[in-house]
Amino acid sequence: MKHLLGIKDLPTSQIENILTTAREFKEVINRPIKKVPSLRDITIANVFFENSTRTRISFELAEKRLSADIVNFSASTSSVKKGETLLDTVNNILAMKVDMIVIRHSSVGAPHFLARHINASVVNAGDGTHEHPTQALLDAYSVWEKLGTIEGKKIALIGDILHSRVALSNIFVFQKLGAEVMVCGPPTLLPKHIEALGVKVTTKLHEALQWCDVANVLRIQLERQQIKYFPSLREYSLYYGINQAMLNQLDKEIVLMHPGPINRGVELSSDAADSPQAIILDQVENGVAVRMAVLYLLAEQR
Ligand code: CP
């Protein structure tokens, strides 16, 4: 594994290796001294062409906990604004003896393009509507930690499946680890032929909630929607918003997840988002351990 570009082509054995390595690092980050010297000879650049809170801070903390040297690049304050290309930008960063690039970009395939043109390792921190592999890995870790196993569990992805990179990476990771996956959303936000990926499909929220062990609720990605996919947020919330009263009416207690950022009052009410069933902040905590595992295993291959 020289790069982590997506889950689609990542062998199950490597996913399992990342999750078991993350378990070791979770123990490390809960010690009084949260740091190990594993990457002290490595320099990592976090190159973000899109906004981020969780992924960016989580990678930065993971790198610091592993004792790597880091530089943070934000497109909005860089010479990209003067017309510099992605490849020129990254090659200039690499000329300063950087070993790994963590990249988030709004264009599908940007990390794959870089991986073909540079020698450094590339980690995809989210490429457009395509994949978000470290989010899927931390989601899988969080389910594994909460339920003890992923094999045989039923995972429902609910919301804006069409524009979500988390959805595709989640489908791949949970299927590879032996779970069943269902997608649920309004017909306009379900990609055509999504059933070809081997997922169950429904437009009925109650059916998805009743079926699943875990509901991973995805954000309405208004910034990617050039046309209207539903009449109003109020109407979306009426048909696809999840609240605690709905969860209480189910036959069993399900686990509630969300990759963040949450549109409170749209896809999740506050009583559901903050309920004991929700593991949303555990996902964030686990993100650091999982990203430490990814960076550590990539550095091992150098
Ligand atoms: N889950 C996630 O990718 O969040 P950010 O956009 O804040 O990084």
Image (cartoon, grey):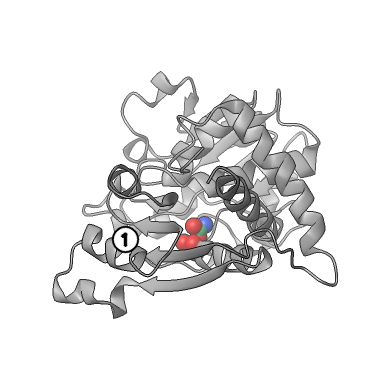
Seen at 74% across and 40% down, the residue is 20
Q: Residues within 10 Å of mark 1 (few under 14, many from 20)?
A: few
Q: Among all residues in the image, which is located at the extreme left?
A: 83
Q: Name which quarter of the figure residue 140 lies in.
A: top right
**Percent of width and height locating residue 220:** 41, 54
- Where is residue 162? Give x, y as percent: 36, 41
Ligand 1 lies under 8 Å from the Cβ of mark 1: no
- Where residue 28 appears, as percent x and y from the top left, is 79, 60
Task: Give the residue displayed 45% in from the left and 31% down from the top.
Answer: 8
**How far across and how far down the image is residue 170, in percent?**
53, 38
- Disc 1 marks a residue whose amino acid type is Glu
Indicate left or right for 235 with 283 as reference. Answer: left
Give the residue displayed 38% in from the left and 72% down from the top.
Answer: 73
- Seen from the viewer's position, the closer of residues 252 and 193 is 193
Q: Is residue 264 left or right of residue 271?
A: left
Q: Nearer the viewer, residue 38 or 225?
A: 38
Residue on which disc 1 sits: 223
Left or right placement of residue 129 versus residue 179 in this view: left
One can see residue 254 in this view:
no
Query: How many circles with numbers are drawn on the protein?
Result: 1
Residue extending furthest toward the bottom:
77
Asked where in the image residue 67 lies, by quadrant, the reply is bottom right
188 on left or right of 124: left
182 in relation to 116, above or below: above
Residue with the most extreme right position: 32
Element type at mark 1? helix
Residue 244, compared with residue 255, is above or below; it is below
Residue 288 seen in this snapshot: yes
